[in-house]
Image (tube, rainbow, N blue to C red):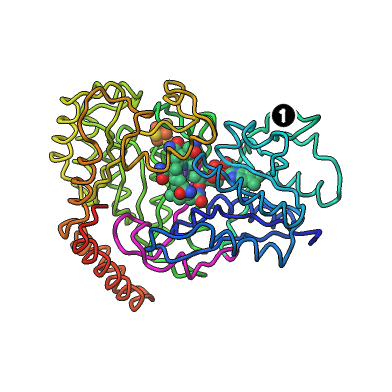
Amino acid sequence: MNNDLVSLIVPPSRANAIGLPITMLNLGSYLKSVGINCEIIDVKIDYLQKHFSKEGVENTIIEKLEKNKPKIIGMSCFTTELDEITKLAERIKKTYNPTIIVGGIHATLLPEEIIFKDSPFDIAVIGEGEITIAELSKLILKNESTKDVDGIAYLENNTMKRTAERALIANLDDLPLLDWSMVDMDYYLRPNLGIIRYMPLSGVGIFTGRGCPFSCSYCANKNLWKRKVRFRSVEKVVDEIESLIKNYKIDSFFIYDDTFTLQKERVIDFCNELNRRKINLIWGCQTRVNTVDEEMIKAMSEANCIQIEFGVESGSQKTLDSVSKGITIQQIKDAFKLSKKYNMRTFNNFMFNLVDEDEDDVKKTLNLVKELNADENSVGILTPYPGCDLYSKIKKLKKEEYILYDNAVAELKPEFKFAKHNIDLKKLLEELRSEYISAKYRTSFLKNKPYIKTILRSKRKLQYLKEYIKIFNAWILRKVLKIKS
Ligand code: B12
Ligand code: SF4
């Protein structure tokens, strides 16, 4: 056993994810910054490959572990990943006996599904993980007891015990800049459609803060970050972007924050700082329609923000209210109008199956989608994951039933039905998605001037060319095979 190594494993189902494993990068960078020897095991396959064998990825993970035998293993867990990481941990424990720590949203919400008699996991980390895993690692590496560490659950006399709640980190600037060298940046920086969706670009997703004060009833966020919002300082965020330009020659970035535009002054400061340091990257962000105004959007546009993704969700005020979205149809229209006025690409995220949605609500949504005429659209089905308020309105699922979530987006499972109507949502989604991959949408980025300028000055022109050919081929193949997503 390697007595001083901590290995953080990215779940096998994320093997084709083109987004960086930011969770593990946060944890790994922090561990390294406090002097703990740490690696990230992030097995990758081509991101255009939709179907792959999780078992094959698992085998590679096991091979890597057998070589280094780390004393501590960390895993992250969304609800949909509980089954796969449990199987992986069981396989690891048959090979040798490291301490396996699990964190993330599912461990935070339901630690009793991680810690139980004969579980392959040793410790569940509840909530924010950096300080907790550092404290745990120091003690475990010295073979000392971890029972006094805050924010964990563990097994004692065959029952789960929880320690005191872990306080949130007061100042996010105390965290180190991410150590991107811990993952395969050549893989992540290949131009792809997932940074500023759906424009082929090389870039990274970053967080400038954590948490969201709102309370949409289909979102699990509040149970992780407790509706408290913390932001990093503008200087630190721009330092991070500058270091990414210097070391990795990125062309773009996307801000993943739940509500980047919550504080107007901060957003404007950020834009001014980008301009002051002459950072010439194009970027995008996701946010809510009720937290933007003209002054802010103008400043963002002048700092090269070219796309805003809005959570529109529905065209019916009644169904927006039914999920406590806290926005109005007028605010949606205003936000799109303003973005267009300042030449930003607009991105409309909407969904069906809202609470008590009827046929008329569906019609209203389809009409609003047409009226907004966004550059890109993404359509989904409201799905009640554990952690969101709506989860309490469905029959409590057993662990074995989490598999239902796997296809919940593609077809409306009876277990997850909130809508009153009997419209075939699977068919409707297929039709809409087929439209959104049509040539009109898939080539719209070519009309974006800042994008074209970025490609022309990029050091990755050849990579872009290869990517365009790949995307074109995949699109033709889908057309020929009539695949609708
Ligand atoms: C980015 C993101 C993704 C990325 C993941 C990229 C990544 N981070 O590696 C992608 C696009 C792949 C993704 C996919 C999905 N996602 Co998602 N995603 C998010 C999002 C927006 C941010 C997550 C993040 O990176 N946060 C930043 C990091 C720093 O925070 P964190 O991950 O929570 O980690 C901290 C703690 O949780 C803890 N921690 C986490 N893991 C570990 C592990 C250890 C060992 C320790 C000690 C601590 C620890 O410490 C970390 C640092 O403090 C969240 C919403 C949110 N704001 O949290 C949803 C969210 C996590 N996603 C969600 C869902 C549902 C999904 C999907 C199932 C959606 C779908 N239907 O396909 C898929 C499933 C993934 C898969 N395996 O296929 C839900 C989860 C709900 C649930 N009960 O599971 C969330 C909460 C959004 C929501 N709807 O409420 N997602
Ligand atoms: S959906 Fe977005 S705005 Fe609503 S609570 Fe979740 S993170 Fe906040």
Q: Kindly identify the residue that appears in the image at 32 percent across and 75 percent down.
A: 466
Query: Quick one: 178 or 219, which is closer to the camera?
Result: 219
Label the magenta part by its dominant secondary structure. loop
Q: Is residue 282 visible?
A: yes
Classify the position of the N terminus by image quarter. Answer: bottom right
Stretch of the chain drawn in magenta: 181-209
Query: Quick one: 233 or 441, which is closer to the camera?
Result: 441
Within 10 angstroms of label 1, few (less than 14), some, or many (20 or more) residues? many
Residue 303 appears in which quarter of the rendering?
bottom left
Image height check: is 131 above or below 150? below
Q: Is label 1 within 8 A of ligand 1 (CB to nearest ligand atom)?
A: no
Q: Is residue 233 visible?
A: no
Q: Kindly identify the residue that appears in the image at 20 percent across and 45 percent down.
A: 432
In the rendered structure, the answer to whether residue 436 lies left or right of residue 405 reads left
Percent across and percent down for residue 311 are 31, 38
In the rendered structure, the answer to whether residue 127 lies left or right of residue 136 reads left
Percent across and percent down for residue 179 are 60, 60
Residue farthest to the bottom?
462
Q: Amino acid at mark 1?
A: Arg
On whether residue 193 falls in the magenta region, the answer is yes
Residue 128 appears in which quarter of the rendering?
top right
Percent across and percent down for residue 142 are 86, 50
- The residue to which callout 1 is attached is 162
In the rendered structure, the answer to whether residue 209 lies left or right of residue 468 reads right
Q: How many marks?
A: 1
- Name the quarter showing ligand 2: top left
On whether residue 240 falls in the magenta region, the answer is no
Percent across and percent down for residue 344 are 24, 51
- Mark 1 lies on a secondary structure that is strand
Image height check: is 194 above or below 146? below
